[in-house]
Image: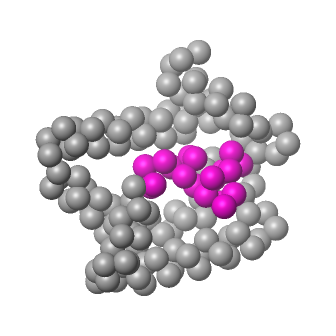
Amino acid sequence: MDVLFSHQNGWFIYSPVMLPVMYFLLKAAKNEWDGARMMLLVWGLTWYVYSSWWAWWLGAAYGFRGFTELLAWLALPIGWTVLHARARKPWLRISAVAITCFLLLLNVRMTVIYRCCWDGPDWTWARLISAWKEALWLT
């Protein structure tokens, strides 16, 4: 779970916009949409391989770069997420767009303020939260 949720390069911590994408990938796999189970299998095997490695956090990089190659595969679940949001009531669509814009802003700002190295024993949840505050112009 650290690969996904750790302050040490956890994928969903540094790319939170992927949370709804993975939700819709799981939903699509359950509903047997074309290719969804294969995408989930490839993603799951990749997750397992990286989680099994002694340096699962992949060093002093920003975010979890191990899933970068899978973003092309995840284009379909991203599209499913957008289609699902478009089919909802206007207030839900507006909320989804606002949340997505906020998450993208946070992700881009975190990339802009990144100063090597955000890992190791000195990189804690408190320091990550401080970085979030800086990214959102709250400090």
Front in this rendered view, residue 116 or 124: 124
Quadrant containing the N terminus in the rendered view: bottom right
Above or below 55: residue 62? above
Residue 15 included in the magenta stretch of the image: yes
Q: Position of residue 24 (x, y in %)?
A: 36, 64
User: Quadrant of the image for the C terminus?
Assistant: top right
* Percent of width and height locating residue 38: 42, 84
Q: Nearer the viewer, residue 27 or 126?
A: 27
**Which residue is at the far right?**
121
User: Start and end of the magenta stretch?
Assistant: 1-19
Q: Residue at x 23, y 58 (%)?
A: 84
Name the image colouring.
one colour
Give the residue drawn at x 41%, y 62%. 23
Numbered-mark total: 0
Q: What is the x, y in percent for residue 78?
A: 33, 61
Query: What residue sits 79% from the left and 63% below the top?
Result: 55
Above-or-below relation of 64 to 122:
below
Taking the view exactly as shown, the residue that stands out farthest to the top is 139
Image quarter of residue 99: top left
Taking the magenta stretch, the answer to whether it contains residue 59 is: no
